[in-house]
Image (cartoon, grey):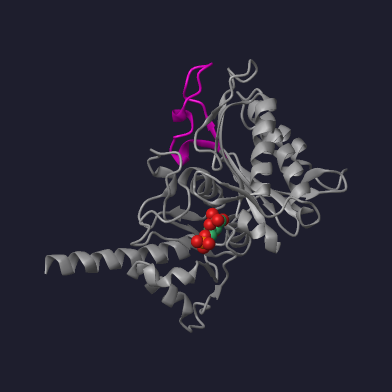
Amino acid sequence: MPEFQTLGQFIIEKQADFPYAKGELSRLLRDIGIAAKIVSREVNKAGLMNITGAAGTSNIQGEVQQKLDIYANEQFIAALRSGGECCIIASEENEHIIPINSLISKTAKYAVAIDPLDGSSNIDVNVPVGTIFSIYRRLSRAGSAVLGDVLQKGKEQVAAGYILYGSSTMLVYTTGKGVNGFTLDPAIGEFCLSHPGMQIPKQGSIYSVNEGNYVHFPQGVKQYIKYCQVNDDISNRPYSSRYIGSMVADIHRNLVKGGIFIYPGTAIAPHGKLRLVYECNPLALVIEQAGGRATNGTERILDLEVSKLHQRSPIFIGSAEMVLAAEAMLAEESLTLNRSYLD
Ligand code: P6P
C-alpha cells in the first residue's frame, strides 16, 4: 500500500462522486497541478536564477510585474491551453480575457480564472507566494467563449483552490465536497494527499490585517482590532497579530490554525484592494467548504454580483465566529451612523 495517495489517484477516485463526469474536470485539475509543479521549481530556486526582481513592466492592476509573475502566467496559460479542457482564461495579469479557440478547446466545458502568482512582490525576500484558481462551467455555446463565462457569481464555481509555494509546496482545493490539501514530494514530482478533509476552527486567536492602514479603516474595523487586543483570559485575548502580505499564505495559516483575515474598504479605496474574481471568490469557496465564513462585511462574498473582470471587494474571511464578531461591530457602526443622521 503506497504511503500517500497522489493528486491524480485522488482526483480519479473522487470523480466517482460526480456520476455524469466524463473526466474533463479531473483532467483540468491535472493540468493545473502540472503547471504548479513547474512554477514551484522556478520559485524554489528563484534566488539562484536570473528570474527574481522586476520585469520592467506593469500589469492591468498597475502593479510592477515581477519576472516570476510573467513566468507563472505563461506556464498556467500554456498548461490550460494544451490540456484542452478550458475554453477561456481570465488572468489577473492580463487586462482582457484569453479565449482558447483551438480545435480541442472549442467545445471545452470549463472557464478558468487565475491569479498566477499572488504576493509576488515578496519573492525577493523569500516570503511564501501563491497561485489562486477558480473553475466555472461555461455558459456560452461551444466555439464562442465570452467574458460572461468568467463573470459569474462565486457560488457558481465548480472548483477553486490555491497553490502555496512555502516551506513546502501545497495544493489545496475543493470541488464543493470539502477541502483537501496535497504536499508536493519533489523526490517523485507528485502532489501527495497530506491534509484530507481540512476544517477551519470555528474560533481562532490570530487576526491578520495591515494595521499600517489603521487610520483609514472604518470605525467598526478599528473597534474589532481593538477588541482583538483586549486582555481577556476567558476569550483567549489578546489575539496574535500575523500579517504576511501574501494572501494565500495568510489564508492557509488561518485555515490550519484558525483566524481572521481582513482587507477592508477605506474612504480612499471603498472597495479595498483584493480582486473579487481572482482572490476573494476562490478563497471564499475554500474557506466556506472548510466550515468558515467569507463576507465583504455585510454580504456573503460568493453571492456578490460580478460585473467587471478586475473589480475589487472588501473581505472578512476565516473562522466563522471571528468573522461574525467583526461584522457585528461594523453593523453597530452603521447603526450609530444612521442614528446620528436621523437625530
Ligand atoms: P498590502 C499581494 O499584493 C496582495 O494582493 C495579497 O496577496 C496580500 O494579502 C495583499 O495584496 C497585501 O496588500 O496593501 O497589505 O501590501
Q: Is residue 159 left or right of residue 308?
A: right
Q: Is residue 135 magenta?
A: yes
Residue that lies at the very extreme toward the front in this rendered image:
56
Name the foreground residue: 38 vs 55: 55
Residue that lies at the very extreme toward the left in this rendered image:
343
Q: Is residue 165 above or below residue 36?
A: below
Residue 301: image location, x then y, percent: 43, 48
Residue 78: image location, x then y, percent: 68, 32
Q: Is residue 60 above or below residue 340?
A: above
Bounds of the magenta segment: 134-158
Name the foreground residue: 50 vs 280: 50
Residue 305: image location, x then y, percent: 37, 40
Residue at (58, 70) in percent of width and height: 242
Name the foreground residue: 14 vs 165: 165
Quadrant position of the C terminus in the picture: bottom left
Q: Quadrant of residue 73?
A: top right
Q: Is residue 270 left or right of residue 156?
A: left
Residue at (58, 18) in percent of width and height: 106
Quadrant position of the N terminus in the picture: top right
Residue 28: image location, x then y, percent: 66, 31
Residue at (68, 55) in percent of width and height: 53
Total marks drawn? Answer: 0
Residue 202 makes an appearance in the image: no
Q: Is residue 2 above or below residue 14?
A: below
